[in-house]
Amino acid sequence: MSALLKNSAFDPSAIVDAVRSVLPETRPLPLHEPEFIGREWEYVKDCIDTGWVSSVGSYVDRFEALCAEATGTRFGIACVNGTAALHIALVAAGVQRDDEVLVQALTFVASANAVHHAGAVPHFVDSEHETLGLDPDALDAYLGEIAESRDGATYNRRTGRRISAVVPMHVFGHPVRMDRLVEVAERWHLDLVEDAAESLGSTRNGRLMGSCGKLAAVSFNGNKTITTGGGGAVVTDDEALAKRLKHLTTTAKLPHRWAFDHDEVGYNYRLPNLNAALGCAQFEMLPQFLAEKRVLAERYRTALAHLPDAQFFGQPEGCESNYWLNVVMVPDRAAREALLEALNADGIQARPCWTPMHELSFNSDCPQASLTVTEELVDRIVNLPSSPKLGRGI
Ligand SMILES: *Cc1c(COP(=O)(O)O)cnc(C)c1O
């Protein structure tokens, strides 16, 4: 890591100039724009022309297969959004009311909300500098301090609650050290549910994100790498879980030609065929978008190299990141604010990282590990415009 001078007078102008040199002159420049330059119109029109607009249709089936393919898994279950996908993945994994679920504090609110929706308690853990995501070694050491294993389950000795799952999130598309996390999760009898909402197409040691845990959730919100307008999916290799997920997300209806029977309280988490049609066309663009996003990241990296107060966050070793949102790190929170001010004043939409989960009022009673790395990263991260077309120079 380069030596960044803390508390020195920070002048954002050199960074602003470098960022400008990468971007077109059009303003405003959004952080991440959806783009429809493939067969989107054709497929959506087909839904309208045929009347198959709602929760059943051939595009849903195609979309689910594409979700599985893009994450290196066998089964995809389309959902109405990524938060619903993560919620239902936790339920299917067996997370029970009043369990604790380990979630990194450095994430979008959906990761923790999904745990609350399942009636469980998020338990916040720290990130590491190398990936921005969950630190598996710190987690292992922390569980050694606060947890005990009994009868094939792990309990928090301080709260008495069972700790049943861990939810790593690949921040801005950069893969968590999943091989190590798989070991830690096994050692502590934790179900591994990936929040792969930001990491479609990212790999570590050639392995696609979404394929490392028992289950993973992906998102197709409007600001993600590809979009269905709003949407998500659960992916898994486990056929029994896939069947269970399809059942749970479709009101737990028993298949019958006319009868409406349901065998439990299910969810209406289905993705409409209209949205799936948009998604099928977007999937056709994914390879191109990923390539363009990597070109853009490389341009930022080059333009920001050698600036003493800026550090471009490059993909972790052994990884190919999708660079969902590009990151420049500055020395401290004051510098972050100065840079955000300067970029936004120029119509370049730059953003800080999320308020970390443990600082949100409704999470104040949740247990937490030491979160010093999270807090440092939050102070220093600035996200830069990252739409695929910017890598095409438009
Ligand atoms: C986008 C996102 C989600 C899912 O969001 P939806 O808007 O519900 O699709 C979940 N987790 C993370 C980390 C995300 O960035």
Image (cartoon, helix red, strand yellow):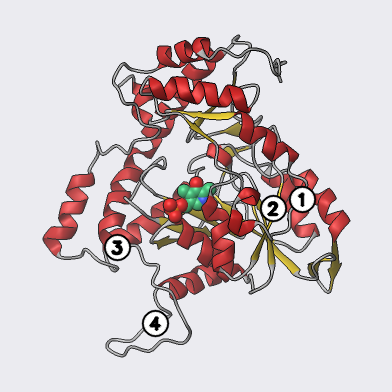
The residue carrying mark 2 is 124
In this view, 284 is above or below 7:
below
- Mark 1 vs mark 2, CA separation in Å: 6 Å
Element on which disc 2 rests: strand
Asked if the residue at tag 2 contacts the one at tag 1, i.e. Cβ–Cβ closer than 8 Å, the answer is yes
Element on which disc 1 rests: loop
Q: Amino acid at mark 3?
A: Pro
The residue carrying mark 4 is 253
- Mark 2 vs mark 3, CA separation in Å: 34 Å
Indicate the position of residue 388 as horizontal and vertical percent values: 37, 30
The residue carrying mark 3 is 272
Name the residue furthest left: 49
Q: Residue at x 51, y 55 (%)?
A: 217
**212 lies left or right of 226:** right
Asked if the residue at tag 3 contacts the one at tag 1, i.e. Cβ–Cβ closer than 8 Å, the answer is no
Q: Which mark is first along the chain, 1 or 4?
A: 4
Q: Amino acid at mark 4?
A: Lys
How packed mark 4 is, by other alpha carbons closer than 10 Å (few <14, some 14-19, many 20 or more), is some
Q: Which mark is first along the chain, 3 or 2?
A: 2
**289 lies left or right of 44:** right
Q: Residue at x 46, y 87 (%)?
A: 263
